[in-house]
Image (cartoon, coloured by chain):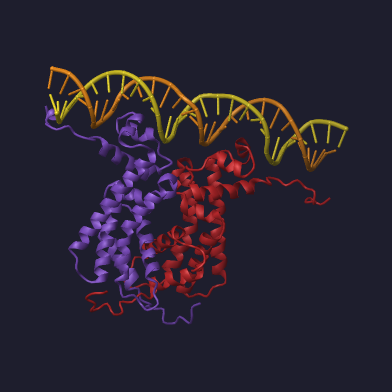
Chain colours: A red, B purple, C orange, D yellow
Amino acid sequence: MANSSPTRIQINNRRELVLETAAGFFVRKGFNGTSIRDIAKAAGMLPGSLYYHFPSKEALLVAVFEEGVQRISDAVDNALSACPDDAWARLQIACEAHLATLLQGSDFAHVVVRVVPHDAPGAEQELVILRNAYEARFITLVEALALPPGTDHSLFRLMLIGAMNHAPLWYREGQETPASLARQFITNLRFAQDIGNSDIKEQT
Amino acid sequence: MANSSPTRIQINNRRELVLETAAGFFVRKGFNGTSIRDIAKAAGMLPGSLYYHFPSKEALLVAVFEEGVQRISDAVDNALSACPDDAWARLQIACEAHLATLLQGSDFAHVVVRVVPHDAPGAEQELVILRNAYEARFITLVEALALPPGTDHSLFRLMLIGAMNHAPLWYREGQETPASLARQFITNLRFAQDIGNSDIKEQT
DNA sequence: TAGAAAAGCAAACGATTGTTTGGTTATTGA
DNA sequence: TCAATAACCAAACAATCGTTTGCTTTTCTA
């Protein structure tokens, strides 16, 4: 007997639907702005039914966070696996994957950026650990850079992450692509020159 | 008696206390994570009493936003008024004032960065207008820069604002000052060199 | 000195919150 | 065939939510 027959019952078959629905609400309404009833109704279920899959609203957020961190981590890792060893090129590739997942992927990764862990006090530590585990990639990537002497690599990384995670607030699909954004992000942080600034007195 | 001094009644004498208390909660708990009862209790009043000063919870948020935008605007404008230097110096001074208000000032300015306007749907437009009115300063400041040819000034500005507004999430008082942060922010975006990267072959 | 306005208290309103409980249906392995 | 389990429904729970109403106290003005 095959242990996975075509008529096999789909275990937790609507768990994913609940997760996706929740991610959408958490992104658009925030954690505290979303009610269990919002999610249940949009998923075609009753409020109490969610508690078969998740023991609490905060546990649901953690599950969404886990999926978001998993997806954006996979995207970045996968992009880096087929990338040259040049530190700047690797960072740019990672930024492109980060932005693509954040701006064009599902809502899961967006939740990780949008929802601040302290909004769910009981799950705060878990959420911070998850996000830190992902962002650790950028510690390595930025430390591999040969930055000008005296540059604080940590601050450089925080600037970059801040700039990237701010993108969902202004990004509109159509004009710019994650790839073009990543290229410009890195260019602005790498090639920014003081061309023509040494004796600039005024601009119009 | 110390409290029976005036010949004039103190109009709205506790309105400021309510505003400050609300700002604190909005920063630490978010808008939807804060209840009217939270604010009232911390301000030593009853929940209903807040409605003498503000017609609704969203109107209270708008008032906090207005105060926050006012304070950070004043800080930046005041810093710029004594800085007729070149464009980069002016931008750095503005960043320093922005960061100082955000990280070391009252909670008012922090609310403007922490609370996303859509969390209060009925006040969303008003909140966006307020924030845009402030951020317009950086449009001018960044457009005055002589950036490398082909640089998107708008994206440059969004990077900088994203990096700065991300700071409250990692800043810890003691080591770095707003001034040192602003200097490094600008340095990273201006003087970033490709030192040690001359062996780069190509970028996509 | 009378009275209007400011400021807030006390108490409740209906609605919504996260969650629980017990029952129901469908599918499974034995 | 049958008990077990997955998955969900139906209905309610106490608590909390933003807000309203009516009343009281204080203070300034006319």
Q: Nearer the viewer, residue C28 or B189?
A: B189
Q: Could you tell me if residue A10 is visible in this image?
A: yes
- Work out whether B106 lies above or below B202: above
- Work out whether B168 lies above or below D26: below
- Residue B79 percent location from the top left of the image: 21, 60
Where residue B21 sits, quadrant-wise, is: top left
**Residue drawn at (46%, 67%), measured in percent from left and top?**
A141
Q: Could you tell me if residue B167 is visible in this image?
A: no
- Residue A40 percent location from the top left of the image: 60, 41
Q: Quadrant of the N terminus of chain B?
A: top left
Q: Nearer the viewer, residue B29 or A41?
A: A41
Q: Nearer the viewer, residue D16 or B184?
A: D16
- Give left or right: position of B186 versus B9: right
**Residue drawn at (38%, 53%), measured in percent from left and top?**
B128
- Give left or right: position of B124 versus A40: left
**Residue drawn at (69%, 47%), measured in percent from left and top?**
A13
**Number of labelled discs?**
0
Q: Nearer the viewer, residue A20 or C21?
A: A20
